[in-house]
Amino acid sequence: MKSVKKYAVKPKLSMLIEEVGGLTIERALLNANAIVEEKKDVILEKIDELVEKIEGAYKNGQFDGEEIYRISSEIVGLSAVEKDGSLAEAAISLCEAIDRSTGIGDRELRIVQVHIDAIRMLHRSDAGPAVHRVVLEGLEKTLNKMPK
């Protein structure tokens, strides 16, 4: 009869936290924020590329829903550099719009275009959180016009 051995592997962060004088959660978060800040320009450039790709996937009155969904998901993953989270919310809303699409009719085309325009506007926007909130409320209203 064979026996199974189980090994509990302790994550490195957990070990550092438990060490006397070790890493505190506050310090770990500060380190993470510093890393994000250090890579912010590279991440923003990558988001620029993704916005261009979304626009490429939506052209001539047609759109590739799977490709737009995939790119929007990537934007969500990278949007930690955007402090208020509005870019991520707009990208998630676009994914929701793709999920709710029943075909490629005029309504779907307009709603996808509105979301793409909102993502472009929110990315690297100098507008404040109040303006971002208005844009996100508009996206929510457009989603509410689609079947669930």
Image: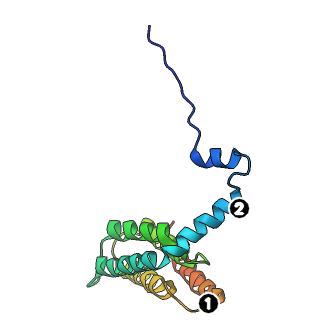
Residue 110 location (% of width, % of height):
40, 84
Residue 95 visible in rendering: yes
Q: Residue lying furthest top in this view? A: 1
The residue sitting at 42% across, 67% down in the picture is 74
Q: Which residue is mark 2?
A: 26
Mark 1 or 2 closer to N-term?
A: 2
Residue, far front: 21
Residue 81 point in image, percent of width and height: 54, 75
Classify residue 31 as left or right of residue 124: right
Q: Is residue 101 above or below residue 52?
A: above
Residue 49, compared with residue 9, is above or below; it is: below
Asked where in the image residue 102 lies, by quadrant, the reply is: bottom left
Point out the frontmost of discs 1 and 2: 2
Q: Element type at marker 2?
A: helix
Quadrant where the N terminus is found in the figure: top left
Q: CA distance from mark 1 to mark 2?
A: 31 Å
x and y, in percent, of residue 131 in the image: 61, 90
Q: Which mark is residue 4?
A: none
Circle 1 sits on which residue? 131
